[in-house]
Image (cartoon, rainbow, N blue to C red):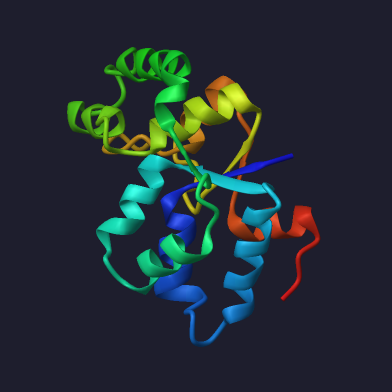
Amino acid sequence: MAYLLDANFFITAHRAHYPFDVVPSFWNKVKELAGQGIIRSLDKVGAEIRKGNDHLKDWADAELPADFFEDSSRHIVAYSRIAQWAAERAFHYSPGAINEFLDADEADAWLIAAASELGNTIVTHEISNPRMKSRIAIPEPCDHFSIQFCNPIQMFRQLGVRF
C-alpha cells in the first residue's frame, strides 16, 4: 500500500512536532520511505511546501526523489468527479468553502482524485467534521468516495515504524 501525503504532514512536522535539529530520525525515515515508493505526494503539495522558502523547502528539494511530487494533472478525470461532488454540496458548504476546495492551486481535491485512482491512503492531520460549512475537509469527500485516510501516527503504526 502506498500513502499520499498532504502538505500538512510536512508543514506540521517541521513547525510543531519534529524540527530538523531535534528529530532528524523522523526526516531520515520520511526520506527512506519516499525512496522506497511507500509514500508520495503531488506537485500541488510540493508547491505549498515551497511557498515557505525555509529549511523544509530546502530539505524537500534536496532529499526527496525527483518524482516524489507527482503531476496532479494525470488525475483530471477523477478530479472532475470530486469537483462535481463539491459543487453538488452547495446546500451545505459556503460558496467560499467550495471555491477554496476547487481552487486549481489547492492540493486537497487533487489528492482525493489521485488517491481514488491509485488506491492510495491519504495521510493528513485533518479530521472529520461533517457539520463544518466554512471548509471542505479531506475526510468528508474521502468518506463519500470510500477513500482511505489516516493521520501520520496511524500511518507509521501501520508501517511498523518506530523512532
Query: Is 42 left or right of 24, judged from the image as shown?
Result: left
- Where is residue 149 drawn, in percent x and y? 60, 40
In this view, 133 is above or below 125? above
List x then y, in percent, for residue 134: 26, 38
Question: Looking at the image, which residue sits at the far left?
Answer: 96
Q: Give the residue drawn at x 39%, y 73%.
A: 15
Above or below for 79 versus 157: above
User: In this rendering, is residue 18 above or below 5?
Assistant: below
Q: Is residue 153 visible?
A: yes
In this view of the protein, which residue sits in the foreground, 79 or 35? 35
Where does the image place residue 140, in percent across and percent down from the top left?
A: 48, 31
* Relative horizontal placement of residue 104, taking residue 113 as reference (left or right): left
Say which residue appears at 29% left-offset and 27% top-offset.
102
Q: Residue at x 26, y 66 (%)?
A: 53
Name the image quarter holding residue 88: top left
Farthest residue, direction bottom = 22
For residue 154, say whether it is visible.
no
Q: Residue sitting at 55 percent across and 53 percent down?
A: 65
* Image side of residue 36 versus residue 67, left or right: right
- Mark count: 0
Q: Residue furthest right?
A: 160
Q: Nearer the viewer, residue 54 or 110?
A: 54
Where, by quadrant of the figure, is residue 96 drawn? top left
Q: Quadrant of the N terminus?
A: top right
Which one is nearer the viewer's eye here, 27 or 88? 27
**x and y percentages locating residue 36 in the rendered image:** 71, 52
Query: In which quadrant of the rendered image does the C terminus lie?
Result: bottom right
